[in-house]
Image (tube, helix red, strand yellow):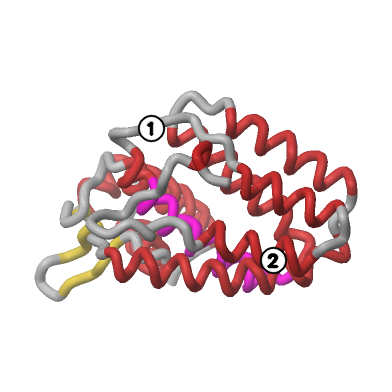
C-alpha cells in the first residue's frame, strides 16, 4: 500500500527520469534498475515502481517480462500518432478555453513566445513552447483532458529534441503568433486550424523524427 509520501517521491522520481529521457541522457533501450534508482533517491522500491508506472503511461518506458524496465524507443509512425492525437485534443481544449481567455492570459502567452524566440538552446525553447500551450489551453478547466495533453506533449518533446539536438537553431514561431492574433480577434476557428497544423508538424519529414526550422515557415 502506497502512502502520500510515497506518491510525492514517485512524482519527483518520474519527473527527474522523464527529463533525462527527453534530454537524451537516458537512451532508448537503456535499462532502469529499481535498486540503483531507489539508492539514488534514498527511498524504497515502492515509489520507484510507481514512478515507472507514470513513465510508462507517458510512453517513455516499457516494462518487459524478465527484462525489467527500459527506456522506450520510438518510430516515425509513433511520432505521427502522437502528433495527430495532440492536434485533436488540443483543438478540443482550445475551443473550450477560448471564451475564458483574457487579455492578460494572451499577453502572458505572447511574452512566453518572445522568450522562446530568444532561447539559447533547444531545452529552453521547449520549456517556453510547453508553457505557451499550457497558458492558452488551461482555461478549458478540463483536468483529465489537460493531463492527457501534457502526457502527449512529453512524448512529443522527446521526438522534437531527438531531431533537433545536433542542429539547434533559434526559431521564430510564427504559428504561435498566428494563434494569438486569431484569438485576440475572436477567430477561434482560425486559431484551431493553425494549432492543429502546428502540433502535427513534428515527424513530417521521412527518415527521422525532426522538425524544420520554424523561422523559415510562412
Q: Is residue 167 above or below residue 202?
A: above
Instruction: Report x, y in % for residue 148.
Output: 55, 69
Marks 1 and 2, how far apart in space?
28 Å
Instruction: Inspect the magenta stretch and tell me whether residue 192 lies in it.
Output: no
What number is the disc on residue 23? none
Circle 1 residue: 168
Mark 1 neighbour class, 10 Å CA radius: few under 14, some 14 to 19, many 20 or more: some
First to last magenta residue range = 141-160
Q: Is residue 162 visible to us here? A: yes
Q: Is residue 157 magenta?
A: yes
Check the image and name the residue furthest to the front. Answer: 218
**Image position of 100 (left or right of 3):** right
Q: Quadrant of residue 62?
A: bottom left
Give the percent coordinates (x, y) of residue 209.
31, 54
Q: Which residue is mark 2?
A: 192
Residue 24 versus residue 89 in the image, above or below: above
Predominant secondary structure in magenta?
Answer: helix
On the image, the x and y values in percent for residue 102 come to 89, 52
Q: Residue at x 56, y 57 (%)?
A: 198
Q: Which image quadrant for residue 54?
A: bottom left
Of 186 and 94, the residue lying toward us: 186
- Locate the N terminus and report the quarter of the image it occupies: bottom left
Amino acid at each position: 500500500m502506497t502512502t502520500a509520501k510515497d506518491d510525492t517521491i514517485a512524482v519527483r522520481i518520474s519527473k527527474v527520469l522523464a527529463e533525462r529521457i527527453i534530454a537524451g541522457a537516458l537512451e532508448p533501450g537503456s535499462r532502469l534498475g529499481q535498486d540503483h534508482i531507489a539508492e539514488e533517491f534514498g527511498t524504497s522500491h515502492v515509489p520507484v515502481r510507481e514512478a515507472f508506472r507514470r513513465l510508462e503511461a507517458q510512453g517513455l518506458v516499457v516494462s518487459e517480462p524478465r527484462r525489467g524496465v527500459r527506456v522506450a524507443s520510438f518510430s516515425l509512425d509513433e511520432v505521427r500518432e502522437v502528433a495527430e492525437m495532440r492536434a485533436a485534443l488540443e483543438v478540443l481544449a482550445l475551443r473550450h478555453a477560448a471564451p475564458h481567455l483574457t487579455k492578460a492570459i494572451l499577453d502572458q502567452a505572447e511574452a512566453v513566445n518572445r522568450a522562446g524566440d530568444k532561447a539559447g538552446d533547444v531545452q529552453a525553447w521547449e520549456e517556453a513552447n510547453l508553457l505557451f500551450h499550457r497558458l492558452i489551453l488551461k482555461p478549458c478547466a478540463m483536468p483529465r483532458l489537460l493531463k492527457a495533453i501534457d502526457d502527449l506533449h512529453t512524448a512529443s518533446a522527446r521526438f522534437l529534441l531527438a531531431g533537433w539536438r545536433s542542429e539547434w537553431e533559434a526559431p521564430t514561431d510564427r504559428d504561435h503568433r498566428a494563434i494569438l492574433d486569431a484569438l485576440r480577434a475572436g477567430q477561434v476557428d482560425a486559431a484551431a486550424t493553425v494549432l492543429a497544423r502546428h502540433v502535427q508538424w513534428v515527424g513530417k519529414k521521412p527518415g527521422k523524427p525532426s522538425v524544420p526550422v520554424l523561422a523559415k515557415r510562412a
